[in-house]
Image (spheres, helix red, strand yellow):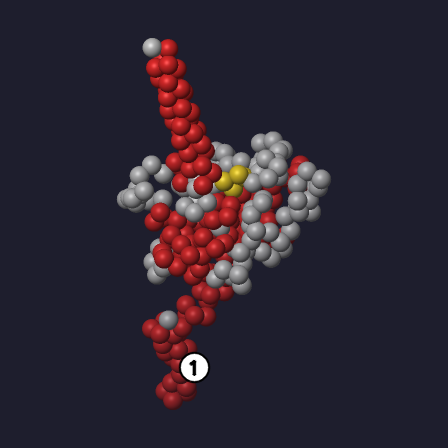
Amino acid sequence: MKKLSARRRHPLAAIVVLLLALACTGGLYAVFAPADKAQADETAQSLAIDEGKKLYAVGCASCHGTGGEGTTDGPSLVGVGAAAVDFQVGTGRMPAQQPGAQVQKKKNIYSQAEIDQLAAYIASLGAGPSIPTEEKYGDEGADIAKGGDLFRTNCAQCHNFTGKGGALTHGKFAPSLEGVSAKHIYEAMQTGPQNMPSFPDTTLTEQNKKDIIAYLNAVNGDETVDPGGLSLGGLGPVSEGLFGWIFGLGSLIAVAVWVAARTAKAKKS
């Protein structure tokens, strides 16, 4: 009878030992936790998409269509990605206040949580650039000198040499980059908003974008010293030429008038 009882207790003892071993090695977590975490992430993403769809129906569908397919008043949003939403809505450009040659930056009316929900919904319509992490646009590991070279080659034609902005055709303009967050500059390069071309990673790598952002932070930072004196807005030859035309030519005209008056007075005397 003793041997029979021992045999009956043996399977239970083995299970207990196995459970203890799994608990000690983290096996229970490995078996159960990942599935629960994945399910929780999927549920959270679904909720974000649902909330974003509601926000979209109220603030965006009238121009971009009920399913983001676009209308005569707004382009299709299928495939623009979450980064485009984060930039356009985060800078207040969308929803647009009124139609025009170019939608201008204004005060943002959405919280970041709502922007994330809108971005999740738009991203669900088609694959596109995702919202960058701070690691991609931070200054750590950036080459400011190389960023300056890249900016002057790819961006200065519109935004000027230090990102002060400039005029384009038909009432359009390249906005100033001073005071724009690093994340939004990165997203603008990714997505090419409005008149700006896009610079995907095949054109400008993640490191290139980081270098450009570091250059802009350096030249527009509070500690930057301009050795040239009066910068005239940093707009280059346009403002400098206008300054020379008005004050330089004006001074020459004033001198000529003064000389003529003195000569006439001398002849009379």
The residue that appears at 32% across and 42% down in the rendered structure is: 228
Which residue is at the front of the view, 141 or 255? 255
Which residue is at the front of the view, 269 or 91? 269
Quadrant where the image shows the C terminus: top left
Question: Image quadrant of residue 235?
Answer: top left
- 255, above or below 139, in the image: above
Question: Can residue 267 be seen at all in this image of the molecule?
Answer: yes
**Residue 156: x %, y % from top left:** 47, 49
- 61, above or below 190, in the image: above
Q: Is residue 18 left or right of residue 188?
A: left
**Residue 66: x %, y % from top left:** 68, 42
Q: Residue furthest right?
A: 72
- Residue identified by numbered label 1: 11
**Residue 110: x %, y % from top left:** 50, 37
Q: Is residue 158 left or right of residue 64?
A: left
Q: Residue furthest top?
A: 269
The residue that appears at 45% across and 32% down in the rendered structure is: 245
Q: Amino acid at mark 1?
A: Pro
**Residue 221: x %, y % from top left:** 33, 44
